[in-house]
Image: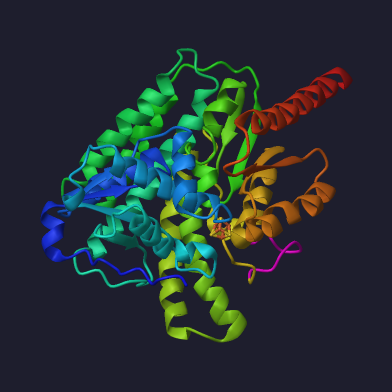
Amino acid sequence: MSQRVKRVVFTKEMKEEYTILVPTMLPMHFEIISRVLNRYGYKTEILKNTGDHIKQLGLQYVHNDTCYPALIVIGQFLDALKSGKYDLHKVALMITQTGGGCRASNYLSLLRKALAKAGYDYIPVISLNFVGIEDCPGFKLTLPLIQKMLYAVIFGDLLMLLRNQCRSYEVNAGESQAKAEYWTERIADMLSAGWVSYSKVKRKYVEIIRDFESVERTDKPKIKVGIVGEIFVKFSPLGNNDLENFLVSENAEVVMPGLLDFLLYCVYNTIVDSRLYGIHKVKAWGAYIIDKYIVGKQKKLISIIRKSSSFRPMTPFDHTRTLTKGYIGLGAKMGEGWLLTAEMLELVEQGVNNIVCAQPFGCLPNHIMGKGMMKPIKERHEGVSIVAIDYDPGATRINQENRIKLMLANAKAASLDLANTL
Ligand code: SF4
């Protein structure tokens, strides 16, 4: 009979002296968020440990039919704890949670179980969420902190977008990545220095965009490849075997919808619930206001990108969410839900005809909203190619990369055919 694992509470006293370990997902975004949290008195550290042994370690402590993102995150935590780098009685772990209906809501207990099995049941685990999943006396999200975390996400998305649009065309190898790293540091400095006005934030957008405009680039066309999928394997280099770098090494331009869309998707689902089922009316009002506020910020950034540069901005979320009409209902909201379909359609609308859909093997929601939607999308959009790549402990990198190479080879052949007919 399985035993209930006790919860170790992260207390106010622990805040002073504990190091909080955070798993890798989006290196730039998380670096800025970590520095913001540190400004509010926490000592967070983003884990950078990587390697094949992490999934093996995950497999030792969680069942192999567990969602791959959970397995990887738990493996990365355990690897860090076993590294000897940390005082195990002064360390806590943090994971992000949306509180949705999917298995991700069980990641907390899976992690605690794995810690108990490994003999670390005294290590506290903090859930970073906006829906009050667990009360945690030592970790509180205040309004100013949430505001700064929101800016961290917006800046992270901007840096990712600019870097990706420069990187495959740069004349001096490594220049765009160096600029992205430079600005990650500067933005982290700015957001962790105290109160920041919105005018200052907007001026920073312009400075960053202009700096990336100065990257010397060739105008040789490249195949654009969009990445969508389950949020962890879509974004995390550890989860997707460094997919972005692989695509760049294959001479493609990576196009990736940002993290802000996922946050807006979570907010918008409360409004959808209220409309569909007549529940949570007060919450839905709150969500409506938050949605308007964040979409307003996203639109301002889009207009600044348009006005001050030749870069392609992100698609405004209030448009993205309309794209699923005729494909899937907004009530499909397990995991990445309808957002996954919407992001594929958003990419197609932007002219990105080749898409990698990164899916944890056995992830039912993503198979429905990702794989299940590929056929209708391809049927209604000629020339679109979508390939679903499974990520799990048994999938080999070589297989994953070969399937993507095949998609790229077909795309190159199609563009040559088109050039010959013109
Ligand atoms: S979306 Fe997929 S991988 Fe994520 S928790 Fe749900 S089933 Fe697991």
Question: Which quarter of the picture shows residue 365?
Answer: bottom right
The span shown in magenta is: 321-330
Q: Quarter of the picture for ligand 1?
A: bottom right
Please state the horizontal and vertical placement of residue 398, each as a whole percent of the image. 64, 28
Does 326 lie within the magenta span?
Answer: yes
By secondary structure, the bulk of the magenta-drawn segment is best described as loop
In this view, the residue in front, 307 or 262, is: 262
Residue 203 visible in this rendered orientation of the protein: no
| Color theme of the render | rainbow
Comparing 88 with 377, the one in front is 88
**Where is residue 258 shown, x and y percent of the image?**
49, 47
Q: In this picture, is 338 found above or below 407?
A: below
Residue sitting nearer the eye, 300 or 46: 46
Of the 4 image quadrants, the one containing the C terminus is top right
Q: Is residue 391 above or below residue 275?
A: above
Instruction: Locate residue 422 relative to residue 361 in the image: left or right.
Output: right
Residue positioned 52% across, 33% down in the render? 311
- Residue at the right extreme of this rendering: 421
Left/right of residue 369 with respect to residue 268 in the rendered view: right
Task: Residue 376 in the image: state x and y as whole percent.
Answer: 80, 54
Which percent across, then down, holds residue 43?
Answer: 19, 48
Magenta-drawn stretch contains 145: no
- Pick whichever, 287 or 105, lies toward us: 105
Residue 394 sits in quarter = top right
Please indicate, yes or no, whether residue 326 appears anywhere in the rendered image: yes
Give the tally of numbered discs.
0
Q: Residue at x 23, y 61 (%)?
A: 144
Question: Looking at the image, which residue sits at the far top?
Answer: 172
Would you say 15 lies left or right of 61 here? left
Residue lying at 83% horizontally and 24% vertically, measured from the top left: 418
